[in-house]
Image: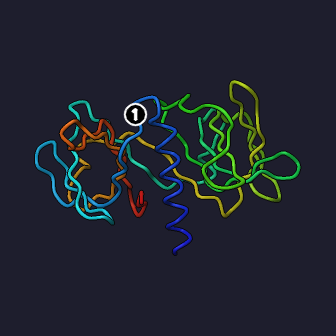
Amino acid sequence: MKIARILTAAVFAMAFAVTTASAQPQGVPVIGQIQGVDGNLLVVKTQAGEQKVALANNVAVWGLEKASVADVSKGAFVGVGATPQADGSQKAIRVIIFAEPMRGNGEGHRPWTRPNTTMTNATVDTTVSGVDGQNIMVKYKDGEKKIIIGSDAVIRKYVAGDKSELKPGAHVGINATKQADGSLQTARVNVGRGDVVPD
């Protein structure tokens, strides 16, 4: 269970980072459970205590759901955190399937935040089932990579959400911006759906 929670945290942290880089500056992570809502103000219980975050008028809400390898289909734009293999392929640790409006965010291949791992944001070109799992070829503007998605890979997908999901009990992940007066504001909230907890 502890390993699963660590992987879930890694999934959220990297997916959020690569999909928000062009939308808002690096800010203050607020990850936890909504305790209260007062108009456009969320009160979120985090491991460090309660945090209040104001929602921008144009706030975007995205749901984060469990997905399966069957959802990693041709044409999907994905983010893959992986371990490089001796043959040049990448063994997936986690796969995030982005919603269509997120296509192109963070495109490319680069080191991931974890030691000896990579991050590839690219479009799925081909999918082939193999003895070691689902093999996919992804293409990005500067190249392509073969990805092996084994049974141990964590797979999640973003889906369009709604402000009505921001209610007490919901698990959320926010990259807030600190204002001049020290308060926090955000233009985007990720909401875990089902038993997905973006922590």
- Horizontal arrangement in the rendering, residue 197 relative to residue 88 (left or right): left
Q: How many marks?
A: 1
- Horizontal arrangement in the rendering, residue 172 relative to residue 69 (left or right): left
Which residue occupies the foreground of this view, 62 or 16?
16
| Residue drawn where x is 64% and y is 49% of the image | 81
Which residue occupies the foreground of this view, 193 or 116?
116
Q: Residue furthest left?
A: 38
Q: Residue furthest right?
A: 87
| Residue drawn where x is 26% and y is 64% of the image | 49
The picture places residue 50, in percent across and down from the top left corner, at 22, 61
Q: Residue furthest top?
A: 141
Question: Does 76 appear above or below 91?
Answer: above
- Horizontal arrangement in the rendering, residue 186 relative to residue 147 (left or right): left
- Horizontal arrangement in the rendering, residue 192 relative to residue 76 (left or right): left
Badge 1 is on which residue? 25
Question: Does 185 appear above or below 95?
Answer: above
The picture places residue 148, in percent across and down from the top left corner, at 75, 51
Q: Quadrant of residue 144?
A: top right
Question: Does 27 appear above or below 130?
Answer: above
| Residue drawn where x is 21% and y is 54% of the image | 167
Q: Which secondary structure, mark 1?
A: loop
Q: Quadrant of residue 61?
A: top left
Q: Which quadrant would the C terminus be assigned to in this image?
A: bottom left
Categorize mark 1 by other alpha carbons within 10 Å: few (<14), some (14-19), many (20+): few
Question: Does 135 appear above or below 106?
Answer: below
Residue type beneath disc 1: Pro
Q: How is the image coloured?
A: rainbow
The picture places residue 184, in percent across and down from the top left corner, at 24, 43
Which residue occupies the foreground of this view, 74 or 45?
45
